Amino acid sequence: MTRIFKQLLADRGLDKSFLHPKYDGLFDPFLMLGMSKAVDRIEKARDAGEKIIIYGDYDADGVTASTVCQNALTGFGCSDVEIMLPNRFTDGYGLNEPAIAEIIKRGATLVVTVDCGSGSGEVIEKLREQGVDTIVTDHHEIPKVPEKAVAVINPKRRDEKYGLNMAGVGVAFTLARALNMRKNGGKCDGQEKWLLDMVALGTVCDSMVLRDENRIMVYYGMIVLGKTRRKGVQELAKKAKCHLEKLTTHGIGFQLGPRINAAGRMKSAEVALDLMLTDSRAEAIRLADELEELNQERREAQDKAVKEVDGSFGDEPVIVAKGKWHEGIVGIVAGRLTEIYKRPAFALTTLEKGILKGSGRSFGEFSLAEALQHCPKNLQLSGGGHAGACGLSFPAEKLDDFKKAMTKYYLSLNLKDQERFLRSKSDVAVENLGELTEELYDEICQLEPFGLGNEEPIFEFVGRVSGRRVLKEKHLSLTVSDGAHEMRLMSFYAPEEQMAVETGDRVKVQFTLSKNEWGGNVRIEGMIISLEVIEKI
């Protein structure tokens, strides 16, 4: 084991068991509150041939969770199972009142929610009055457990001892394991592992902390993705130019995930759901093509929206931008504004009847959920979320009042140096570039899957630039030297300040390791995270 890798493990408090997690390290699903009641009710529905509706969400977590639940219920022997996904534009998030009539119309007597339902107590009660039972599986905040639900399986329950921060698809998979155990006399038969491809996709796309249960599920999920039987995932990967057998969490987050999410953002999540469920190669190709088109449409719409923002925010601590934008991209626009201006940001679009609807993104110590709660009632604001992201709407004539309320609340907190939360933290300071070997790279790969709570190691180096090239007028290739060794560093779509670096400059650079294999040769390179000139030539 190399010196640097030993240092990384020690600094992160990790041991060999973290590098090679055991699948049987997953906890007994029946230890979760509500699980036994949920399985009992599903078993009753199976035996009676009841119609079951799975009610999900329109993002990647909701789509994958719905797929897992459908596969699990049919595998358990339930013969009449349908999925309902809300439409972002007409229904909004979660199990809501308009869904009641459709559920009744379809003749369902049992609803199983995935990735939603924790805040739908009134709807669940009304369904109960109509003779429809509800099982909630969710992972969102749950201030009050819906009393009329048959069972509520949510790791965020205040009375839940196993308070694991799983994605909605992780909770759905835990139910799937419980069903598999019930079917097979108390022990899983292993067939449930084929669902882990969906668990990996949904967990990574929902930015869950990749420790404990999540690490185990995603670790094995990446293996299953490499062997997935789902024709839709295979065709989606081809469109994204991904090799499933070599897929990383970066590939999920930046290549597959945006395409899955594009369905719910730009049209309907049904497109992505159908892709996950289809057994037809021709249908998979058609749906993957449609997702590719929707993702391109999404990318063009968000780029256009960001360019339309005039940037005249002055010293406003919270950015509030408004435009006539596609409703499905406002969250991405808010995120881009936060990234560019390093301030919390809201992106609002104008709807009919003079309503502004949008999303917020934040970081550090400024909680959007708390900020919305501090808005005066005369704003007629509706919405919610958590510290880092939220959705909201209010009358357009209240825009100035909303801006003032956000500024007032931000200043009342007296926050200091919030940009520190956006700065990358180095794991290892390197003086000898010769230590960055292929052996070290292979060791670091054992830490995969990377994500929140298990970030890819960042190296920091101070030295001279001994070579510089610009590729295709937008990518920067630098060679840095410690005096005895050289190393190539790449920055794709490099910003202007990086392009200004010249040969001979002394720089401080942060980077991650990558392997370049070409023509039978292997070279360890770096991907630039940040670059600072500390001495010009």
Image (cartoon, rainbow, N blue to C red):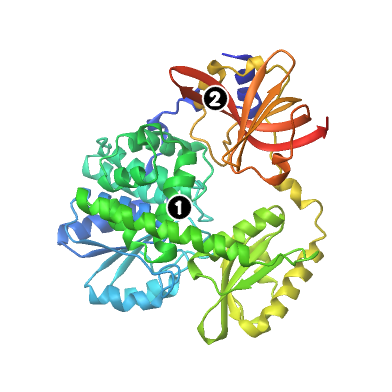
Q: Amino acid at mark 2?
A: Ile
**Relative horizontal placement of residue 511, taking residue 239 as reference (left or right):** right
Picture residue at 45% right of the left edge, 25% below the top: 20
Callout 1–callout 2 Cβ contact below 8 Å: no
* Crowd band around label 2 with a 10 angstrom C-alpha radius: few (<14), some (14–19), many (20+): some
Residue 504 position within the rendered picture, expressed as x and y whole percent measured from the top left: 77, 26
Mark 2: which secondary structure?
A: helix
Q: Secondary structure at mark 1?
A: helix
Task: Give the labeled residue for mark 1.
Answer: 258
Q: Can residue 99 be spotted in the picture?
A: yes
Residue 305 % position (x, y): 57, 65
Locate the N terminus by quadrant. Answer: top right
On screen, residue 399 versus residue 235, left or right, reads right
Q: Is residue 290 left or right of residue 382?
A: left
The residue under the point 25% across, 51% down is 284
Mark 1 vs mark 2, CA separation in Å: 26 Å
- Number of marks in the rendered image: 2
Q: Residue under circle 2?
A: 444
The percent position of residue 320, horizontal first and vertical second, equals: 68, 69
Does 171 appear above or below 344? above
